[in-house]
Image: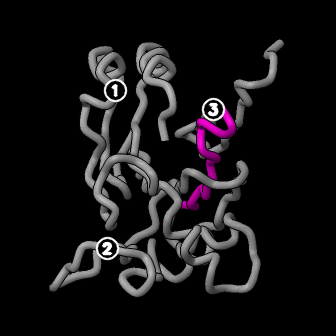
Amino acid sequence: RITSALSASALAGALPVTVLPGRADPATLALPQQPLHACLLPRAARRGGLTLAPNPHHCAVGGVQLLCHAGQPLADLEKYVAPRGRLELLAATAGWAHLAPTTPDTLGCYPFANADPFVLADLPHVLAAGNQPEFATRLLPAPAGRAPTRLLCVPAFHATPLLVLLDLASLDCLSIDLAQPQP
């Protein structure tokens, strides 16, 4: 959830920013959520560095496949499994090859008649979940003949202003807490 259009504008002016709607945002409630409308972030939208994307969102950056969602699948799944932590739940969804295993039973989704859009035919290089209680990351080992997958749990920016930098070549990542003074 973006709490300040000014902060979104500042970020979009400095680097490319992709915003996915979350549970409490003015977007469709059922997954996949439609992108936020540009009128909600007018200054950031004018800067040109802002992409308003659906939730979940799949894209490629520099040949690296990224799949991100705003966290609803993990929050819903946490209600039904033994306590594991959100990173372990994200790893479980990767292992199950399903991004949102509780849809449509307890997590609303659009009724798809012919195929389940949340089935993961292939794991991406990066699987990220936003709006998580804390930052966590882990590299899933690569199955035979495939690349490894970097799992990322990223906290909600309005609660924990954290910037996560990802090296696209190595999939190493670094978190920078913007609330802490930087040297």
Q: Secondary structure at mark 2?
A: loop
For marks 1 and 2, the one nearer the N-term is: 1
Residue 142 vertical placement versus 2 (above, below): below
Q: Image point 79% across, 16% down: which residue?
A: 182
What separation in Å lies between label 3 and label 2 (alpha carbons)?
A: 29 Å
Task: Tell me if 147 is positioned left or right of 12 in this view.
Answer: right
Residue denoted by label 2: 109
> Label 1 is placed on what type of residue?
Leu
Kindly indicate whether the residue at mark 2 contacts the one at mark 1 (C-beta within 8 angstroms). no
What separation in Å lies between label 1 and label 2 (alpha carbons)?
A: 26 Å
Q: Secondary structure at mark 1?
A: loop
Q: Image point 50% across, 69% down: which residue?
A: 73
Q: Position of residue 36 (x, y in %)?
A: 30, 42
The label on residue 41 is 1
> Label 3 is placed on what type of residue?
Leu
What separation in Å lies between label 1 and label 3 (alpha carbons)?
A: 20 Å
For marks 3 and 2, the one nearer the N-term is: 2
Q: Nearer the viewer, mark 3 or mark 2?
A: 2
Give the residues in magenta. Answer: 147-161
Residue denoted by label 3: 163
